[in-house]
């Protein structure tokens, strides 16, 4: 069996590109970017909680990085570097090779560099810390939405949760719908290009990881505003629209989570510019509601503007 050091050397060490010193010493060194702010985030995927033991390692490598890039996108940051802390029950080389391949393929696409990490034996746990850069004052925060703004959503929600429901046998999707939903679940595409283009345009933003209503709720709570979401306006993928179990489809749409889309608010006079940003980033954008005066909460409205009662509004990790 290969040693920890061979493992790091073989699967995770690449020549340093932008780092002053990459993998191999006690710390990586990066030259502090002059005039920029660092955006730093960490996200952990735990076997049994965030992925199943038999999950495809290539897609796991992709997803472990993607969820972190999604957080950077939600702040409008340019991704630059990341660290990987890995606990594995054994050094399975086929698993490691596929995991590294999936992770580095996404890293290349976003020009983000692995600069360090930690490797230990234990229950499988994948933790990535990602670092991005931003011009000062341009971060897309959760606490800066204001009355009168539109609420926008990239792509659509619910597909990942529907894919998980399919895996768990709660629903039987067609082969095409299952392939689409499982790709959305296991290999999400972080909205990095959109996030950076929304700098100076969006007033607030969050990425949808816990469920659409829950995450809009975080903007409402932290900005102390009320968000109204129009149920009929919510975009639905063909797979979700075709799902025969409407209650399940609605639950996935509103509260499924693992979507890694961006929800953001922007002043109404920015509509044309927002649409141009979406087009430039090649991401569909939909206006799904507005920020209004009132208690910090989310309201789901029907086509006539009447509130719809919502039971479960998202995934609570300790609920
Ligand atoms: P230390 O004992 O000083 O923490 P380690 O022996 O854990 O150092 O790691 C040696 C080098 O390998 C360090 O530069 C560390 O950042 C890097 N490293 C360890 N594990 C990983 C990993 N999974 N991915 C990338 N780099 C790693
Ligand atoms: Mg160590």
Image (cartoon, rainbow, N blue to C red):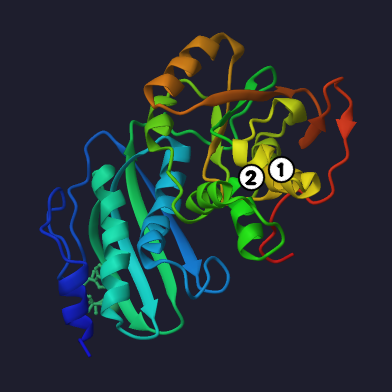
Which residue is depicted at the point 61% across and 50% down? 174
- Mark 1 vs mark 2, CA separation in Å: 7 Å
In depth, the one of 173 and 131 nearer the eye is 173
Is residue 230 placed above or below 54 in the rendered structure?
above
CB of residue at label 1: within 8 Å of ligand 1?
no
Which residue is depicted at the point 15% across and 48% down? 18
Label 2 SS? loop
Residue 158 numbered mark, or none: 2
| Left or right of 265 on screen, residue 88 | left
Where is residue 131 drawn, in percent x and y? 33, 50
| Image quadrant containing the N terminus | bottom left
CB of residue at label 2: within 8 Å of ligand 1?
no
In depth, the one of 282 and 247 nearer the eye is 247
| Left or right of 155 on screen, residue 307 | right
Q: Is residue 279 visible?
A: yes
Do residues under tags 1 and 2 come within 8 Å of each other at their CB atoms? yes
Where is residue 75 drawn, in percent x and y? 45, 38
Where is residue 252 drawn, in percent x and y? 69, 48
Label 1 SS? helix
Which residue is depicted at the point 15% across and 73% down? 9
Is residue 66 placed above or below 8 in the rendered structure?
above
Is residue 3 placed above or below 127 in the rendered structure?
below
- Residue 95 position by quadrant: bottom left
In depth, the one of 236 and 18 nearer the eye is 236
- Crowding at mark 1 (Cα within 10 Å: few <14, some 14-19, many 20+): many
Residue 155 numbered mark, or none: none
Number of labels in the image equals 2
Residue 254 numbered mark, or none: 1
For this orientation, the residue located farthest to the front is 175
- Crowding at mark 2 (Cα within 10 Å: few <14, some 14-19, many 20+): many
Q: Is residue 26 visible?
A: no
């Amino acid at each position: 069996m290969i040693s920890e050091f061979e493992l790091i050397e073989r699967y995770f060490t690449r020549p340093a590109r932008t780092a002053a010193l990459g993998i191999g010493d006690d710390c990586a060194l990066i030259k502090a970017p002059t005039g920029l702010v660092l955006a730093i985030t960490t996200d952990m995927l735990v076997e049994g909680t965030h992925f199943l033991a038999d999950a495809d390692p290539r897609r796991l490598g992709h997803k472990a990085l993607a969820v972190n890039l999604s957080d950077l996108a939600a702040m409008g940051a340019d991704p630059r570097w990341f660290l990987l802390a890995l606990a594995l029950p054994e050094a399975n080389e086929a698993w490691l090779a596929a995991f590294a391949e999936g992770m580095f393929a996404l890293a290349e696409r976003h020009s983000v560099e692995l600069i360090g990490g930690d490797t230990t034996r234990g229950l499988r746990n994948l933790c990535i810390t990602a670092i991005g850069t931003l011009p000062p004052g341009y971060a897309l925060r959760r606490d800066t939405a204001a009355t009168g703004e539109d609420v926008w959503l990239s792509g659509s929600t619910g597909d990942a949760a529907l894919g998980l429901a399919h895996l768990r046998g709660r629903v039987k999707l067609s082969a095409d719908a299952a392939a689409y939903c499982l790709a959305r679940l296991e290999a999400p595409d972080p909205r990095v290009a959109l996030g950076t283009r929304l700098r100076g345009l969006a007033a607030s933003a969050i990425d949808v990881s816990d469920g659409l209503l829950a995450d809009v709720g975080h903007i409402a709570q932290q900005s102390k505003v009320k968000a109204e979401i129009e149920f009929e306006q919510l975009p639905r993928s063909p797979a979700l629209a075709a799902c025969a179990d409407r209650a399940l489809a609605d639950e996935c749409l509103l509260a499924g989570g693992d979507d890694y889309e961006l929800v953001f608010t922007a002043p109404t006079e920015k509509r044309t510019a927002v649409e141009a940003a979406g087009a430039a980033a090649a991401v569909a954008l939909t206006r799904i509601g507005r920020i209004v005066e009132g208690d910090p909460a989310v309201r789901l409205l029907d086509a006539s503007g009447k509130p719809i009662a919502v039971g479960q509004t998202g995934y609570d990790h300790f609920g």
